[in-house]
Image (cartoon, rainbow, N blue to C red):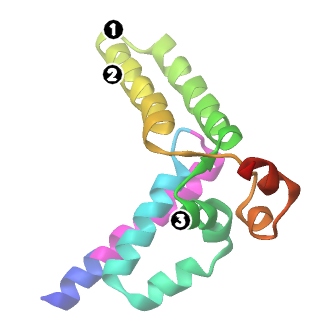
Amino acid sequence: MKKAINLIFIALGCICLALGTVGIFLPVLPTTPLYLLTLFFFARGSKRFHAWFASTGLYDRYLSEFMATKTMTLSAKLKILAIATAFEAFGFYYAPWPARIVIVVLAVIHWVYFFRVIPTRRTQSLSAAQEGTPAQGRAQM
């Protein structure tokens, strides 16, 4: 039974990985949350899959700083929200009225989540902050 559950977690991780990778090219799919789900499912299903994903460039590029600090820069938040809002606006324009209400609700949830739940980091990168750059010194004053 445990093996079957692990296989389900691995399959779900693979699905999230595939969708997240497609989301790199199609902004309508959220890459970072799907990669977070990939990490979660792989951690539950297999230590080897989890270790493999954590060692990939995809993890480094999209998740490593977020996982280390649990924060995002303002520019990263605005970039993500600008793309999402543009696609939501496109969908809003072509959707019938009941779907428009859902789109507006989702857009508001995106904005509230990014600015109320995820803290904003002042420095541009975690590695720069760890090296003790002048930006870090100014933030401490």
Say which quarter of the image contains residue 47: bottom left
Tag 1 or tag 3, which sits nearer the N-term?
A: 3
- Element under label 1? helix
Q: Residue furthest top?
A: 97
- Looking at the image, residue 116 sits to the left or right of residue 55; the answer is left
Residue 21 part of the magenta segment: yes
Residue at 66%, 39% in the rendered image: 74
Q: Percent from the top left, x then y, of residue 69?
A: 57, 61
Q: Which mark is residue 63?
A: none
Given residues 112 and 48, the one toward you in this image is 112
- Element under label 2? helix
For residue 130, above or below residue 95: below
Q: CA distance from mark 2 to mark 3?
A: 30 Å
Q: Which mark is residue 97?
A: 1
Label 2 vs label 1, nearer the camera: 2
Tag 1 or tag 2, which sits nearer the N-term?
A: 1
Q: CA distance from mark 3 to mark 1?
A: 38 Å
Q: Percent from the top left, x then y, of residue 100?
A: 37, 14
Q: Which mark is residue 67?
A: 3
Residue at 49%, 21% in the rendered image: 91
Q: CA distance from mark 2 to mark 1?
A: 9 Å
Say which quarter of the image contains residue 108: top left
Label 2 vs label 3, nearer the camera: 3
Q: Which residue is mark 2?
A: 102
Specify start and end residues of the magenta stretch as a single range. 9-27
- Looking at the image, residue 117 sits to the left or right of residue 53; the answer is left
Inspect the image, locate mark 2, and give the three-letter code of the amino acid beneath it. Val
